[in-house]
Amino acid sequence: MKLMLELVRRHKQTAPGHAAVGIPSVCSAHPVVIAATLRECATHGRPALIEATSNQVNQDGGYTGMTPVDFRRYVQQMAAEEGLPPELLVLGGDHLGPNAWRKLPAEAAMAKAEVMVAQYVAAGFRKIHLDCSMSCAGDPVPLPEEVIAARAVRLCHAAEAAWRDATDRGEPPVYVIGTEVPVPGGAHEDLGELAVTSPDAASSTLALHRHAFERAGLELAWQRVIAMVVQPGVEFDHHKVIDYRPEKARELSAFIETQPGLVYEAHSTDYQTPEHLAQLARDHFAILKVGPGVTFALRETLWGLAAVEREWVGEGDGLVDTVLGVMRAEPEHWRGYYQDASRLDVDLAYSLSDRIRYYWAHPAVRRACDTMLARLDAAPPPLTLLSQYLPRQYEAVREGRLPTHTDALLRDGTVQALRPYLAACTA
Protein backbone atom coordinates (compact mmCIF):
# COMPACT_ATOMS: atom_id res chain seq x y z
CA MET A 1 0.00 0.00 0.00
CA LYS A 2 1.09 3.52 -0.71
CA LEU A 3 1.57 4.64 2.89
CA MET A 4 4.06 1.86 3.64
CA LEU A 5 5.81 2.15 0.28
CA GLU A 6 6.21 5.89 0.81
CA LEU A 7 7.50 5.35 4.34
CA VAL A 8 10.20 3.00 3.05
CA ARG A 9 11.09 5.41 0.24
CA ARG A 10 11.54 8.29 2.68
CA HIS A 11 13.54 6.11 5.06
CA LYS A 12 15.95 5.20 2.28
CA GLN A 13 16.44 8.91 1.51
CA THR A 14 17.30 9.85 5.11
CA ALA A 15 20.86 11.11 5.48
CA PRO A 16 23.11 9.04 7.80
CA GLY A 17 23.07 10.18 11.41
CA HIS A 18 19.65 11.81 11.19
CA ALA A 19 16.47 10.67 12.95
CA ALA A 20 15.09 7.85 10.86
CA VAL A 21 11.72 7.57 9.18
CA GLY A 22 10.02 4.49 10.60
CA ILE A 23 6.90 3.13 12.20
CA PRO A 24 6.06 1.13 15.33
CA SER A 25 4.04 -2.02 14.72
CA VAL A 26 1.71 -2.76 17.63
CA CYS A 27 0.85 -6.43 17.72
CA SER A 28 -2.00 -6.84 20.19
CA ALA A 29 -5.71 -7.57 20.28
CA HIS A 30 -6.39 -5.97 23.67
CA PRO A 31 -8.95 -3.15 23.38
CA VAL A 32 -7.12 -0.82 25.79
CA VAL A 33 -3.81 -1.30 23.95
CA ILE A 34 -5.37 -0.69 20.56
CA ALA A 35 -7.46 2.29 21.68
CA ALA A 36 -4.49 3.90 23.46
CA THR A 37 -2.33 3.42 20.36
CA LEU A 38 -4.96 4.88 18.05
CA ARG A 39 -5.53 7.87 20.34
CA GLU A 40 -1.81 8.59 20.62
CA CYS A 41 -1.31 8.37 16.86
CA ALA A 42 -4.38 10.53 16.20
CA THR A 43 -3.14 13.16 18.66
CA HIS A 44 0.18 13.45 16.83
CA GLY A 45 -1.10 12.92 13.27
CA ARG A 46 0.90 9.70 12.95
CA PRO A 47 -0.03 6.53 11.06
CA ALA A 48 -1.02 3.60 13.27
CA LEU A 49 0.12 0.11 12.27
CA ILE A 50 -1.92 -2.51 14.12
CA GLU A 51 -1.10 -6.15 13.51
CA ALA A 52 -2.80 -9.42 14.34
CA THR A 53 -0.91 -12.70 14.51
CA SER A 54 -1.96 -15.99 12.97
CA ASN A 55 -2.57 -17.37 16.48
CA GLN A 56 -4.70 -14.42 17.56
CA VAL A 57 -6.87 -14.09 14.46
CA ASN A 58 -7.58 -16.66 11.77
CA GLN A 59 -10.44 -18.36 9.93
CA ASP A 60 -11.05 -20.56 12.99
CA GLY A 61 -11.18 -17.57 15.33
CA GLY A 62 -7.73 -17.91 16.92
CA TYR A 63 -7.41 -17.38 20.64
CA THR A 64 -9.35 -14.08 20.39
CA GLY A 65 -12.35 -15.71 18.71
CA MET A 66 -12.03 -13.24 15.82
CA THR A 67 -11.72 -13.85 12.09
CA PRO A 68 -9.82 -11.30 9.96
CA VAL A 69 -13.08 -9.51 9.07
CA ASP A 70 -14.03 -9.36 12.74
CA PHE A 71 -10.66 -7.87 13.68
CA ARG A 72 -10.82 -5.28 10.90
CA ARG A 73 -14.26 -4.08 12.05
CA TYR A 74 -13.12 -4.09 15.67
CA VAL A 75 -10.10 -1.87 14.95
CA GLN A 76 -11.85 0.39 12.45
CA GLN A 77 -14.62 1.13 14.92
CA MET A 78 -12.08 2.06 17.59
CA ALA A 79 -10.16 4.20 15.10
CA ALA A 80 -13.31 6.17 14.37
CA GLU A 81 -14.01 6.59 18.09
CA GLU A 82 -10.44 7.74 18.79
CA GLY A 83 -10.38 10.20 15.90
CA LEU A 84 -7.77 8.53 13.69
CA PRO A 85 -8.44 9.24 9.99
CA PRO A 86 -8.98 6.05 7.94
CA GLU A 87 -6.04 6.88 5.69
CA LEU A 88 -3.69 6.71 8.70
CA LEU A 89 -4.74 3.19 9.75
CA VAL A 90 -2.69 0.26 8.47
CA LEU A 91 -3.73 -3.31 9.29
CA GLY A 92 -1.07 -5.99 9.18
CA GLY A 93 -0.91 -9.75 9.52
CA ASP A 94 2.05 -11.05 11.52
CA HIS A 95 3.61 -14.52 11.25
CA LEU A 96 1.09 -15.51 8.58
CA GLY A 97 1.90 -19.10 7.73
CA PRO A 98 1.29 -22.58 9.09
CA ASN A 99 2.31 -21.76 12.67
CA ALA A 100 -1.16 -22.28 14.15
CA TRP A 101 -1.39 -25.72 12.48
CA ARG A 102 2.23 -26.87 12.61
CA LYS A 103 1.21 -30.12 14.33
CA LEU A 104 -0.50 -31.12 11.08
CA PRO A 105 1.35 -32.55 8.05
CA ALA A 106 2.81 -29.80 5.92
CA GLU A 107 0.28 -30.00 3.07
CA ALA A 108 -2.70 -29.78 5.42
CA ALA A 109 -1.10 -26.96 7.42
CA MET A 110 -0.25 -24.99 4.27
CA ALA A 111 -3.78 -25.42 2.93
CA LYS A 112 -5.07 -23.85 6.15
CA ALA A 113 -2.48 -21.08 5.89
CA GLU A 114 -3.53 -20.27 2.31
CA VAL A 115 -7.15 -19.84 3.42
CA MET A 116 -6.02 -17.63 6.30
CA VAL A 117 -3.82 -15.35 4.18
CA ALA A 118 -6.58 -14.97 1.59
CA GLN A 119 -9.04 -13.99 4.32
CA TYR A 120 -6.63 -11.42 5.74
CA VAL A 121 -6.18 -9.73 2.36
CA ALA A 122 -9.89 -9.93 1.48
CA ALA A 123 -10.67 -8.28 4.83
CA GLY A 124 -8.43 -5.29 4.03
CA PHE A 125 -5.13 -6.16 5.71
CA ARG A 126 -2.44 -4.67 3.53
CA LYS A 127 0.85 -5.46 5.28
CA ILE A 128 1.44 -9.19 5.14
CA HIS A 129 4.31 -11.01 6.85
CA LEU A 130 4.83 -14.30 4.99
CA ASP A 131 6.35 -16.56 7.64
CA CYS A 132 6.80 -20.22 6.72
CA SER A 133 9.91 -20.73 8.84
CA MET A 134 8.37 -23.32 11.18
CA SER A 135 8.50 -27.07 10.59
CA CYS A 136 5.22 -28.98 10.38
CA ALA A 137 4.59 -32.63 11.22
CA GLY A 138 6.99 -34.78 9.22
CA ASP A 139 9.21 -31.85 8.20
CA PRO A 140 12.96 -31.74 8.85
CA VAL A 141 14.14 -29.44 11.64
CA PRO A 142 15.26 -26.86 10.81
CA LEU A 143 13.32 -26.39 7.60
CA PRO A 144 15.55 -25.81 4.53
CA GLU A 145 15.41 -22.21 3.39
CA GLU A 146 14.47 -23.26 -0.14
CA VAL A 147 11.34 -24.91 1.27
CA ILE A 148 10.56 -21.81 3.33
CA ALA A 149 10.79 -19.62 0.21
CA ALA A 150 8.64 -22.00 -1.85
CA ARG A 151 5.94 -22.01 0.83
CA ALA A 152 6.06 -18.22 1.07
CA VAL A 153 5.38 -18.12 -2.66
CA ARG A 154 2.30 -20.32 -2.19
CA LEU A 155 0.94 -17.88 0.36
CA CYS A 156 1.77 -14.89 -1.83
CA HIS A 157 -0.23 -16.46 -4.68
CA ALA A 158 -3.18 -16.82 -2.31
CA ALA A 159 -2.82 -13.22 -1.16
CA GLU A 160 -2.58 -11.81 -4.67
CA ALA A 161 -5.58 -13.83 -5.86
CA ALA A 162 -7.64 -12.61 -2.90
CA TRP A 163 -6.74 -9.01 -3.70
CA ARG A 164 -7.62 -9.39 -7.38
CA ASP A 165 -10.95 -11.05 -6.54
CA ALA A 166 -12.01 -8.55 -3.88
CA THR A 167 -15.15 -6.57 -4.64
CA ASP A 168 -13.60 -3.41 -3.19
CA ARG A 169 -10.04 -4.13 -4.23
CA GLY A 170 -8.27 -1.03 -2.97
CA GLU A 171 -4.49 -0.88 -2.91
CA PRO A 172 -2.48 -4.09 -3.32
CA PRO A 173 -0.77 -5.60 -0.27
CA VAL A 174 2.88 -5.12 0.63
CA TYR A 175 4.92 -8.01 1.96
CA VAL A 176 7.53 -8.80 4.59
CA ILE A 177 9.74 -11.86 4.24
CA GLY A 178 12.45 -13.38 6.39
CA THR A 179 13.38 -16.66 8.02
CA GLU A 180 15.42 -15.58 11.05
CA VAL A 181 12.26 -14.89 13.01
CA PRO A 182 12.41 -14.60 16.82
CA VAL A 183 9.97 -16.70 18.81
CA PRO A 184 6.64 -14.83 19.01
CA GLY A 185 6.15 -13.39 22.48
CA GLY A 186 9.75 -13.79 23.64
CA ALA A 187 12.13 -16.66 24.24
CA HIS A 188 11.02 -19.72 26.23
CA GLU A 189 14.32 -20.15 28.03
CA ASP A 190 16.92 -18.05 29.80
CA LEU A 191 18.98 -16.18 27.24
CA GLY A 192 22.65 -15.60 26.80
CA GLU A 193 24.21 -13.55 24.03
CA LEU A 194 22.45 -13.62 20.65
CA ALA A 195 24.06 -14.03 17.25
CA VAL A 196 23.22 -11.25 14.81
CA THR A 197 22.15 -12.30 11.30
CA SER A 198 25.15 -12.16 9.00
CA PRO A 199 25.04 -10.15 5.76
CA ASP A 200 25.66 -13.40 3.85
CA ALA A 201 22.60 -15.01 5.47
CA ALA A 202 20.46 -11.96 4.72
CA SER A 203 21.69 -11.93 1.12
CA SER A 204 20.91 -15.64 0.73
CA THR A 205 17.39 -15.22 2.13
CA LEU A 206 16.74 -12.31 -0.20
CA ALA A 207 18.09 -14.09 -3.28
CA LEU A 208 16.17 -17.32 -2.61
CA HIS A 209 12.90 -15.48 -2.17
CA ARG A 210 13.45 -13.21 -5.16
CA HIS A 211 14.16 -16.17 -7.45
CA ALA A 212 11.20 -18.13 -6.07
CA PHE A 213 8.88 -15.15 -6.70
CA GLU A 214 10.22 -14.69 -10.22
CA ARG A 215 9.89 -18.39 -11.12
CA ALA A 216 6.29 -18.27 -9.91
CA GLY A 217 5.43 -15.25 -12.05
CA LEU A 218 5.15 -12.94 -9.04
CA GLU A 219 7.49 -10.21 -10.27
CA LEU A 220 4.91 -7.47 -9.60
CA ALA A 221 4.33 -8.77 -6.09
CA TRP A 222 8.09 -8.80 -5.48
CA GLN A 223 8.16 -5.07 -6.17
CA ARG A 224 5.93 -4.73 -3.11
CA VAL A 225 8.24 -6.64 -0.77
CA ILE A 226 9.23 -3.81 1.56
CA ALA A 227 11.07 -5.50 4.42
CA MET A 228 12.77 -8.60 5.68
CA VAL A 229 12.95 -9.95 9.22
CA VAL A 230 16.43 -10.59 10.55
CA GLN A 231 17.94 -10.93 14.01
CA PRO A 232 19.60 -7.66 15.08
CA GLY A 233 20.62 -9.15 18.41
CA VAL A 234 17.60 -8.16 20.52
CA GLU A 235 15.38 -10.46 22.56
CA PHE A 236 13.85 -10.93 25.99
CA ASP A 237 13.06 -13.91 28.16
CA HIS A 238 11.09 -14.05 31.38
CA HIS A 239 13.21 -11.63 33.41
CA LYS A 240 16.04 -10.42 31.19
CA VAL A 241 16.44 -8.22 28.12
CA ILE A 242 19.20 -8.56 25.53
CA ASP A 243 19.92 -4.97 24.49
CA TYR A 244 20.74 -3.80 21.00
CA ARG A 245 24.45 -3.36 20.32
CA PRO A 246 24.87 -1.29 17.15
CA GLU A 247 28.48 -2.29 16.64
CA LYS A 248 27.47 -5.94 16.27
CA ALA A 249 24.89 -5.12 13.58
CA ARG A 250 27.02 -2.66 11.62
CA GLU A 251 27.65 -5.00 8.66
CA LEU A 252 24.02 -6.11 8.60
CA SER A 253 22.93 -2.48 8.55
CA ALA A 254 25.33 -1.70 5.71
CA PHE A 255 23.97 -4.60 3.64
CA ILE A 256 20.41 -3.29 3.48
CA GLU A 257 21.71 0.10 2.30
CA THR A 258 22.62 -1.67 -0.97
CA GLN A 259 19.08 -2.99 -1.48
CA PRO A 260 16.70 -0.43 -3.05
CA GLY A 261 13.21 -0.34 -1.62
CA LEU A 262 13.98 -2.61 1.34
CA VAL A 263 14.30 -2.06 5.08
CA TYR A 264 14.46 -4.42 8.03
CA GLU A 265 11.62 -5.34 10.34
CA ALA A 266 12.78 -5.96 13.91
CA HIS A 267 10.79 -8.35 16.08
CA SER A 268 11.05 -8.73 19.87
CA THR A 269 12.10 -5.11 20.40
CA ASP A 270 9.94 -5.03 23.54
CA TYR A 271 11.70 -3.51 26.58
CA GLN A 272 14.54 -1.94 24.57
CA THR A 273 15.57 1.45 25.94
CA PRO A 274 14.50 4.61 24.07
CA GLU A 275 18.10 5.13 22.95
CA HIS A 276 18.33 1.61 21.55
CA LEU A 277 15.00 1.96 19.73
CA ALA A 278 16.22 5.15 18.09
CA GLN A 279 19.47 3.46 17.10
CA LEU A 280 17.58 0.50 15.62
CA ALA A 281 15.54 2.87 13.48
CA ARG A 282 18.68 4.71 12.32
CA ASP A 283 20.27 1.36 11.45
CA HIS A 284 17.41 0.64 9.02
CA PHE A 285 15.19 -1.42 11.30
CA ALA A 286 12.42 0.90 10.17
CA ILE A 287 9.54 -1.32 11.34
CA LEU A 288 9.77 -1.90 15.10
CA LYS A 289 7.49 -4.63 16.42
CA VAL A 290 6.11 -4.45 19.95
CA GLY A 291 3.51 -6.66 21.62
CA PRO A 292 4.14 -8.09 25.09
CA GLY A 293 5.90 -4.88 26.11
CA VAL A 294 2.67 -2.92 25.77
CA THR A 295 0.46 -5.50 27.48
CA PHE A 296 3.11 -5.71 30.23
CA ALA A 297 2.61 -1.97 30.77
CA LEU A 298 -1.15 -2.56 30.81
CA ARG A 299 -0.71 -5.26 33.47
CA GLU A 300 1.56 -3.04 35.55
CA THR A 301 -1.07 -0.30 35.54
CA LEU A 302 -3.85 -2.72 36.44
CA TRP A 303 -1.73 -4.10 39.29
CA GLY A 304 -1.21 -0.54 40.51
CA LEU A 305 -4.95 0.16 40.38
CA ALA A 306 -5.57 -3.13 42.21
CA ALA A 307 -3.24 -2.00 45.00
CA VAL A 308 -5.08 1.32 45.19
CA GLU A 309 -8.39 -0.54 45.38
CA ARG A 310 -7.09 -2.77 48.16
CA GLU A 311 -6.00 0.21 50.24
CA TRP A 312 -9.02 2.41 49.48
CA VAL A 313 -12.02 0.08 49.08
CA GLY A 314 -10.80 -3.25 50.41
CA GLU A 315 -13.61 -5.40 49.05
CA GLY A 316 -13.73 -8.75 47.26
CA ASP A 317 -11.00 -11.14 46.22
CA GLY A 318 -9.24 -8.55 44.10
CA LEU A 319 -8.17 -8.56 40.47
CA VAL A 320 -4.71 -10.03 41.07
CA ASP A 321 -6.00 -13.06 42.96
CA THR A 322 -8.64 -13.65 40.28
CA VAL A 323 -6.20 -13.49 37.38
CA LEU A 324 -3.62 -15.75 38.99
CA GLY A 325 -6.33 -18.18 40.07
CA VAL A 326 -7.64 -18.47 36.51
CA MET A 327 -4.10 -18.93 35.18
CA ARG A 328 -3.42 -21.76 37.59
CA ALA A 329 -6.76 -23.42 36.83
CA GLU A 330 -6.27 -23.11 33.06
CA PRO A 331 -2.53 -23.35 32.39
CA GLU A 332 -2.56 -24.11 28.66
CA HIS A 333 -1.26 -20.63 27.71
CA TRP A 334 1.80 -20.72 29.99
CA ARG A 335 2.58 -24.38 30.77
CA GLY A 336 5.15 -24.69 27.97
CA TYR A 337 6.87 -21.44 28.95
CA TYR A 338 7.25 -21.34 32.73
CA GLN A 339 9.33 -24.37 33.65
CA ASP A 340 10.91 -23.38 37.00
CA ALA A 341 8.49 -24.39 39.76
CA SER A 342 10.50 -22.46 42.37
CA ARG A 343 9.71 -19.14 40.70
CA LEU A 344 6.32 -19.94 39.20
CA ASP A 345 4.48 -17.35 41.29
CA VAL A 346 6.80 -14.60 40.05
CA ASP A 347 6.70 -15.81 36.44
CA LEU A 348 2.90 -15.93 36.35
CA ALA A 349 2.55 -12.39 37.62
CA TYR A 350 5.63 -10.57 36.33
CA SER A 351 7.34 -12.39 33.42
CA LEU A 352 8.39 -10.16 30.54
CA SER A 353 6.87 -12.72 28.16
CA ASP A 354 3.56 -11.63 29.71
CA ARG A 355 1.51 -14.78 29.25
CA ILE A 356 -1.19 -12.98 31.25
CA ARG A 357 -2.19 -11.31 27.99
CA TYR A 358 -3.98 -14.51 26.97
CA TYR A 359 -6.29 -14.26 29.99
CA TRP A 360 -7.69 -10.71 29.92
CA ALA A 361 -10.67 -11.82 27.82
CA HIS A 362 -11.56 -14.66 30.22
CA PRO A 363 -15.08 -13.99 31.62
CA ALA A 364 -14.00 -14.20 35.28
CA VAL A 365 -11.04 -11.90 34.67
CA ARG A 366 -13.15 -9.40 32.75
CA ARG A 367 -15.72 -9.30 35.57
CA ALA A 368 -13.02 -8.75 38.18
CA CYS A 369 -11.41 -6.01 36.10
CA ASP A 370 -14.70 -4.23 35.38
CA THR A 371 -15.69 -4.46 39.06
CA MET A 372 -12.39 -2.97 40.23
CA LEU A 373 -12.53 -0.08 37.77
CA ALA A 374 -16.17 0.67 38.64
CA ARG A 375 -15.39 0.74 42.37
CA LEU A 376 -12.54 3.19 41.87
CA ASP A 377 -14.65 5.43 39.63
CA ALA A 378 -17.48 5.40 42.19
CA ALA A 379 -15.09 6.24 45.03
CA PRO A 380 -12.13 8.12 43.50
CA PRO A 381 -8.99 7.48 45.56
CA PRO A 382 -6.90 10.27 47.05
CA LEU A 383 -3.84 11.59 45.28
CA THR A 384 -1.65 10.06 47.96
CA LEU A 385 -2.52 6.55 46.76
CA LEU A 386 -1.95 7.50 43.12
CA SER A 387 1.44 8.86 44.14
CA GLN A 388 2.26 5.61 45.93
CA TYR A 389 1.18 3.11 43.27
CA LEU A 390 0.94 5.05 39.97
CA PRO A 391 3.58 7.79 40.31
CA ARG A 392 3.77 8.64 36.60
CA GLN A 393 0.03 9.11 36.38
CA TYR A 394 0.07 11.08 39.65
CA GLU A 395 2.47 13.58 38.12
CA ALA A 396 0.25 13.96 35.04
CA VAL A 397 -2.84 14.44 37.22
CA ARG A 398 -1.09 17.09 39.34
CA GLU A 399 -0.01 18.94 36.20
CA GLY A 400 -3.57 18.90 34.84
CA ARG A 401 -2.70 16.69 31.88
CA LEU A 402 -4.70 13.65 32.97
CA PRO A 403 -8.11 13.15 34.62
CA THR A 404 -8.43 10.70 37.49
CA HIS A 405 -10.98 8.46 35.76
CA THR A 406 -9.67 4.90 35.62
CA ASP A 407 -10.03 4.71 31.83
CA ALA A 408 -7.63 7.64 31.45
CA LEU A 409 -5.21 6.24 34.04
CA LEU A 410 -5.18 2.84 32.38
CA ARG A 411 -4.65 4.20 28.89
CA ASP A 412 -1.87 6.49 30.02
CA GLY A 413 -0.07 3.67 31.81
CA THR A 414 -0.37 1.48 28.74
CA VAL A 415 0.77 4.05 26.21
CA GLN A 416 3.94 4.73 28.22
CA ALA A 417 5.38 1.66 26.46
CA LEU A 418 4.51 3.01 23.02
CA ARG A 419 5.80 6.57 23.31
CA PRO A 420 9.50 5.63 23.02
CA TYR A 421 8.68 3.89 19.73
CA LEU A 422 6.99 6.97 18.31
CA ALA A 423 9.91 9.10 19.50
CA ALA A 424 12.40 6.73 17.84
CA CYS A 425 10.71 7.01 14.45
CA THR A 426 9.82 10.14 12.54
CA ALA A 427 6.59 9.84 10.60
Image: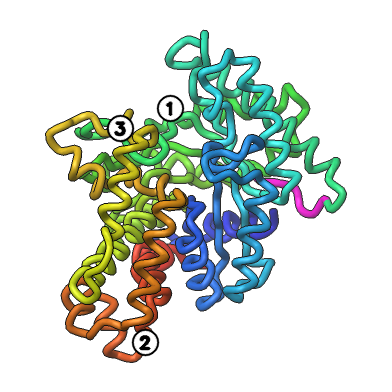
Which sits in the foreground, 333 or 255? Answer: 333
Q: Earlier in the sequence, mark 3 or mark 1?
A: 1
Q: Is residue 166 found left or right of 212 in the rendered image?
A: right
The residue under the point 56% across, 22% down is 148
Point out the frontmost of discs 2 and 1: 2
SS at mark 1 in the image: helix
Question: Type of residue at label 2?
Answer: Arg
Q: Which residue is mark 1?
A: 200
- What span is colored magenta in the figure? 169-174
The percent position of residue 317, horizontal first and vertical second, equals 26, 58
Left or right of 164 on screen, residue 235: left
- 239 magenta-colored: no
Instruction: Using a 10 Å C-alpha cutoff, classify the residue at mark 1 as few (fewer than 14 neighbours), some (14 to 19) or many (20 or more).
Output: few
Q: Is residue 326 above or below residue 375?
A: above
Q: Residue at x 25, y 75 (%)?
A: 392
Q: Tell me if 410 is positioned left or right of 63 in this view.
A: left
CA–CA distance between discs 2 and 1?
A: 50 Å
- Residue 281 lies, with reference to residue 98, above or below; the image says below
Gap between marks 3 and 2 measured at Cα = 39 Å
Question: Label for residue 337?
Answer: 3
Location of residue 18 by image quarter: bottom left
Q: CA distance from mark 3 to mark 1?
A: 32 Å
Please indicate, yes or no, whether residue 275 appears anywhere in the rendered image: no
